Every structure is written in C-alpha cells, then in structure tokens.
Amino acid sequence: MPDAKEDDRDREDAEKAPDPLAPVTDVLLAAAGLPASEVARRVRAALPSAITEIAESNRRLREAGHSRDALLAAAAAELRAAAEALLVSNGGAHVDDTARLRRLADDLERSIDPARDPVARSAPAPGGPRPRVLVTDDDPDAREALVELLQPEWEVLTAADGEEALDVARDERPDLVLMDLSMPRLDGLQALERMRADPSTAEVPVIFVSARGEPSIKARALDLGAVDYLQKPFSDRELRARIERTLRLARSQTALRELAQTDPLTGLANLRAFRARLEDEVKRARRYRTPLTCVMADMDQLKPINDQLGHIVGDRAIAAVAAVIRGELRETDFGARYGGDEFVLLLPHTGAEEGRVLAERVCARLRETVLEISGRRVPIGASFGVACLPDDAGDGAAEALVRAADAALYRAKRAGRGRVAAAVPEDAEGPREHA
C-alpha cells in the first residue's frame, strides 16, 4: 500500500519537472491580452493544488490496481504450480503442455509489470507474429493515415465499412479492431453488435474512433461491448497508448480465461469449457444443417492402477490417455476432460461413421501405449461411445447428444471394454452406470 513518502515524492517530482505550459504561454497571453508576468503568477499560484490532486489521483489508482495485481500474481503462481505438477506426474513427458501453462503464467506476470518484457508493450516476440489491428473506416484518407501510423508497431488490416469488417474479423481473427462510427451498409454500432453475437468474434476488443462525441453515442458503444471510445481529433501518442493498454488487458484476460477453462492435469479443456462449447456447436450445426458427432471415452481398469501403484501413477495414466486423444484431434475438434478418467470429444462437420473411425484409431493407439513405472510396464486403455446429432434435433439436443454417446459408451463397457460402440436411437435416454 502506498504511503505518505510516496505522495511526497510525487509532489517533489512534479515540482522539479519542466513547466509543460511554457511553450504555449506566450501564445495564450497574446490572445488574452494579459501581461506575461500576470499569467505566469496565476499559473504558479494554481500549480500546488494541481500537483496535490495529481498525487492523490495516483495514489487512488495504485490502490485500485493493487487488488487486480494480487489476483493476477496468484493466478500466475497457480499456473506455474500446475505446470510443475504436470511435468512430475508425466515423468517429464508432454513438455508442450507444461510450456503452454508457463507461457500463460508469463503473460499474467507481464500484464502486472509491463516493463518486465517488451512484449507487454505490444511488440512482437523475437521471430514471433505481431499483434494484428483491423482499421475500419469508409474514408480512404483516414484509413491510410491510420495504417501509416500503426504499421511500424503492428500488423494492420483494413475494411471500408462494417460489413467488410465483420468478414475480415471472422477470417483473420485480429487482436484489436479500430472502428469508425458512421459508415455505409453497416455502421460501427451495428457491426459491433453482430461481432458480439458471433462466437468467433465475440471476444475481439473494439475501440471506436469517431468525430462524434455525444454522451449517448459513447454510452451506447460501451453498452454494446466496446472497450474504449476515442474522439477525433486525437494525438498519435494517445492512440498508441490506448491500443497498447487494450492489447495488454486482452492478453491478461485471455490468460485468465484459459486458466479457468483448462484442466491442469491433461491440458485439455475442463467440463465448464465443454458445456459452453457444446451449446455453441449444437446451435451452429442446427443453423447450418451440418453434422456434429460426440465421442465419450472412459478409461479401463484405472482403479487397479490407483490401488496397486498409487494415484500419482494413476494421474500419469490419465495424462497419457489425454495425450493420445489430443494427438488425433483436428484443429476444429474439441477435447475435454469430462471428470475423473472420462473424456469427451466434439467433432464438428463429422458424421457418426467418421467419428467411429476416429474413436477406433484412438482405441488402437491406446492398446499400443504402455507406461514404464520403475521397471514395470503398465498398459492403459479406454472404451468409447459415439453419437451424432440427429437431423431433426429440437430443444434439449445438446443434453440428448451427450446422453446418447454416454449410453453407447456404457454398452461398449458391458461388451468387454477396450472397444467402440455407436449410439442407437434409444440411447438418447440411456443410463450412466459404467465405472
């Protein structure tokens, strides 16, 4: 917590700093018709109270940031602990997973102290991609001016109106959008509203840049989800500062969101993330009439491993199964730890037969996977249930899809384990009795 000495230093630094009004004083005085000595006297008389107000504002800002920084620091520490636990439980395997958790921790720590790493000022890591900024403005001159200003620090994309901005945002996934307000076809507010309604662009931060400054317009933009509103004319320095601040906050929010949605043992998504993704994928499949397949997996004979070799070895077995599953997923697929030794996969644009083929491939790979524990070979395996979203799926389709895959998994278990079963119509009401 800041103390009185810090406030005193703020005042002393401000008093010692060069007078920022000096370069414009003569012009202001000439316009006002006042003697220079009189205006200088008034400015200096007002300066002590202004310095006191600045110091007090700084103190309040530091206090407000303290709790946020503490939360981020705690989250970073938990990420690092999870990375170490994953490394130990995997016996040094799956280094990519631990590296990913450590990178998330690094992002959180850099958001607390931007000076720790140049990446925190939006500069790219050596050899890495630069943050992408989408400039949306129907005025070609204004658009070109922003491109020229921003290109030295960021990769810049452009759009001439809101409709084009939506297309570019969906295809290119920019890190930030600068949006004009008044544009043809689709204005800035309409474009923002559609971005927030689309899962693929819902999290992209948007800063409005407009000559309009009515409070009602600004309030509407912020209500729709804009992160900032910058009124023209503005300085280049102010625009850069707001972009850097927004990108920095977006990185920390992304890291926290990934932390909240990631299972630390396996590196897969957790149950909370699965439920959110399930609803989105079912809606998308119904809207565009595309197939969606769900695969449920449950490890075979994990209890004897836990009983005979301990839960640390059991955790290694769970992580090994997750690694095999992850290695078979496409970029568009989604895998999650459903709980304990159960896993669930969502396969968009995939029919039941294709889903069964993937499950058979994972099942075969698991039969070939053996853990080496103190000279002892520990086999691992799993059973799988596969279900596809019906063409006539109605309300409750998401829950019914998971129930059908789970019931198929139960039948695979009863048939002898280590195998794959496809869902039948009555599986939508199937039981959850397998162990």
Image: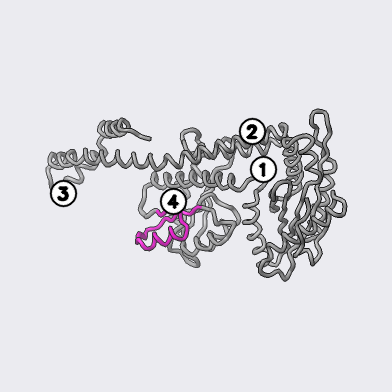
Dot 4: what SS? helix
**Which three-letter amino acid code belongs to the residue tagged 2?**
Glu
**Residue 84 circle label:** 2
**Contact flag, marks 4 and 1 (Cβ < 8 Å):** no
Lower sequence index among marks 3 and 1: 3
Task: Look at discs 4 and 3 and give the one toward the viewer.
Answer: 3
**Which three-letter amino acid code belongs to the residue tagged 4?**
Ala
Magenta residue span: 205-229
Which residue is pictured at 25% across the width and 33% down the height?
15
**Which three-letter amino acid code belongs to the residue tagged 1?**
Gly
Residue 329 percent location from the top left of the image: 73, 49
**Contact flag, marks 2 and 4 (Cβ < 8 Å):** no
Label 3: which residue? 32
Lower sequence index among marks 2 and 3: 3
Lower sequence index among marks 2 and 4: 2
**Which three-letter amino acid code belongs to the residue tagged 3?**
Ala
Task: Say which of 170 and 415 sits in front.
Answer: 415
**Residue 145 circle label:** 4
Dot 2: what SS? helix
Label 1: which residue? 267
- The part of the image, by quadrant, that contains residue 96 is top right
Q: What is the spatial separation of the Cα atoms under label 2 and label 4, in whole angstroms?
A: 48 Å
Near mark 1 (Cα within 10 A), the count class, few <14, some 14-19 or many ≥20, is many
